[in-house]
Amino acid sequence: MKSRDTESDFELYVTRTPGYLWALLFRLLHVHPIAVTLISTVLGAAAGYFFWSEELRVNAIGMLLLVCANWLDCADGQLARMTGQKTLIGRILDGFAGDVWFFSIYLFITLRLTPQWGIWIWLLCAWAGFRCHARQCAIGDYYRNVHLWFLPGVENELNTSRQEREEYRSLRWRSRDWFHKLYLFFYISYTKGQEEQCPRFQHFYKRLTERYGQDVPMEIRLRFVEKSRPLMKYTNILTFDTRVGVLFLSLIVGLPWIYPVFESTVLEAMRFYTISCHETFSEEFDKQL
């Protein structure tokens, strides 16, 4: 782990510990982290198919597949760090895996509910998935990276879309860097979307790095971490565990529409609250700079 601050007890014991044990096994078997990522992607995508059925026994197979996919998704990163087999394509595939899982989940829930809901379930799931889910996960991931950047003693790069754009322009298509350039082409938009959700922090961060670079005074780091730490529990809720818990509960009670409604209401309200808190103290730090 990079920091205990960004890991809830549930994630530590239910996700990371099994993932670590899988990583140890894969290291023993000399399995490459990319292979683990691909297996995780297939399992997570397959899980969605089993949510199409109205039979709980069939749904339970999908739940088990999704849990296993999440363990492997945790294992591939730990395995890469254990073995030093960290690659750009591995990083890309790791981020892509979660998108594939939830696209499949939404697709098959939508197909299941179409006979009763008609076009409305397609509109609801499109809004919940492409708009709400995407922005919630993006800001949750971003705020955790921000926290780690300020946390003393933790190695973490908080790249800006401007830095990524400069790197993109420095690379050439007709070179061995073409794949990295392609990756940056898409990743710049993702980073920019994260930044657009928190403009006050962007103003503070820009001024802070212009004045101090990476050598931010310890006093500022510690005060920022103290303000940021209470929000880490919300960033965890906005990412995976809570939303999957609600998904499973909705399937158990036979009302899968609860899941997209939950993302569109409760998690959206939490996203706004988290951003509001973070923007408020970021503005305070900016004024004190």
Image: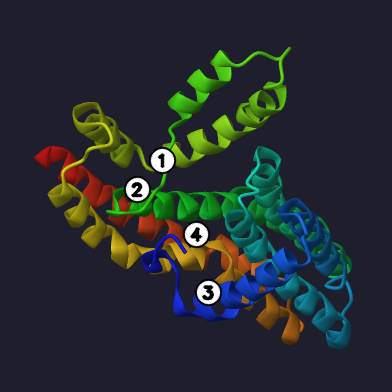
Label 2 packing within 10 angstroms: few (<14), some (14-19), many (20+): some
x then y, percent, for residue 148: 37, 53
User: Label 3 belongs to which residue?
Assistant: 11
Q: Residue at x 65, y 13 (%)?
A: 172
Say whether residue 183 is left or right of residue 139. right
Depth order, front residue of 277/43: 43
Say whether residue 149 is left or right of residue 57. left
Q: Which mark is residue 149?
A: 2
Amino acid, disc 2: Trp
Query: How far is the residue under mark 3 from the one under mark 2?
Result: 21 Å
Asked if the residue under mark 1 is in contact with the one under mark 3, i.e. CB atoms within 8 Å, the reply is no
Amino acid, disc 1: Leu
x then y, percent, for residue 39: 81, 60
Q: Which mark is residue 268?
A: 4
Q: If you read the primary sequence from the N terminus, does the residue marked by circle 3 or circle 1 appear first?
A: 3
Q: Residue at x 30, y 67 (%)?
A: 230
